[in-house]
Image (spheres, rainbow, N blue to C red):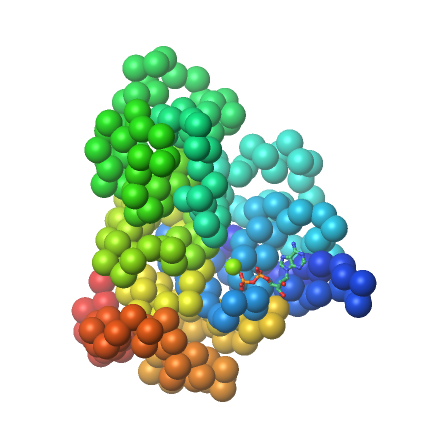
Amino acid sequence: MRPVLEVSDLHVHFPTPRGPVKAVDGVSFALHPGERLGLIGESGSGKSTIALAVMRLIKPPGEIVRGRILLEGVDLLGLSEEEMRRRRLAKIALVTQGAMNSLNPVIRIRDQIIDGMQAHGIRLSRRGFDGRLTELLQAVDLRPDVADLFPHQLSGGMKQRVCIAAAISLRPAVIIADEPTSALDVVVQRRVMQTLRRVQDELRAAVILIGHDMGLMAQFAERVAVMRAGQLVEVNGVREIFARPQHPYTRLLMESLPSLERRGSSLLATARAAVARTTSGGNDS
Ligand SMILES: Nc1ncnc2c1ncn2[C@@H]1O[C@H](COP(=O)(O)OP(=O)(O)O)[C@@H](O)[C@H]1O
Ligand SMILES: [Mg+2]
């Protein structure tokens, strides 16, 4: 099967007075239709920069200095800004890190989502939009009347669900979710992840989940790519990564499980159980 997204030899630099920061330094990977790929690595390793580069949203003076990004066979780096704009949201959507805090505080949820659709040329009657909005909100387990609220009237988990609803509004083939739950408490995190998983399944979208929580990764991803200092040091099936991490850095990540330890042993136990399930060779659905 041809990959839906293929990144080859991607280099992204941010100039500084002391020379360029090579935030992404020769990264290549492929994402298959419907696949769930986890992208992990410590803070500053270049995960968000990959996401922004794939969306062509790197802000100058940051620059993609080399590489190829094929989306459904089309090189995004060769497109005009207008052609790229039309593909964002429609073909590839990003839930940015901290997205829930970037919702416009003075615009109702309804209009935030509909504005995005209209910007892509979707023309529906008021009733048509309302119907679609209800569908989208239900898909992320929100009540339809959330559409009438402002962001400050929602909890963090609800805001993150709104961001997911907006991201799927045009049924993209690829969704990138950059640490979509890291600002939420553990119980809410798990529920939001379950929602993302179900939405992904219904849409048959490919998803890149960026994060550093091994427990959530183990439950969500089929394959895991490990970043360190701008490079991918290991890409493997989730079972293999957990059972037999190849790279010393991956082993370190597995051993430390820092975010899990901090949140107490019950979650750690859950994560270990999840890993045991995925590594047992039995039910991995
Ligand atoms: N706008 C920017 N200007 C300068 N440096 C940046 C910018 N964005 C990211 N970087 C640098 O690029 C590297 C990777 O950052 P990032 O992709 O945000 O990492 P991650 O998402 O893995 O935490 C870091 O060293 C960071 O300081
Ligand atoms: Mg980041």
Please count the marks in the image: 0
Name the spot of residue 50 as percent of width and height, x first: 57, 57
Residue 92: in sight, yes or no? yes
Camera-side residue of 204 and 145? 145
Question: Which residue shows up at 24% across the image and 27% down it?
Answer: 145
Q: Quadrant of ligand 1?
A: bottom right
Camera-side residue of 225 and 116? 116
Residue 1: in sight, yes or no? no
Q: Is residue 89 above or below residue 48?
A: above
Residue 239 found in image quarter: bottom left
Camera-side residue of 37 and 47? 47
Question: Which residue shows up at 57% across the image and 46% down it?
Answer: 55
Q: Quadrant of the C terminus?
A: bottom left
Question: Which residue shows up at 53% across the image and 62% down it?
Answer: 47
| Left or right position of 112 against 22 | left
Q: Quadrant of the N terminus?
A: bottom left
Name the spot of residue 225 as percent of width and height, x first: 47, 69
Camera-side residue of 90 and 189? 189
Name the spot of residue 97 as percent of width and height, x first: 47, 52
| Left or right position of 171 against 97 | left
Point out the residue furthest to the front here: 152
Q: Is residue 216 above or below residue 107?
A: below
Q: Is residue 187 above or below residue 116?
A: below
Name the spot of residue 165 as percent of width and height, x first: 35, 38
Residue 231 found in image quarter: bottom right
Question: Which residue shows up at 27% across the image and 49% down it?
Answer: 195
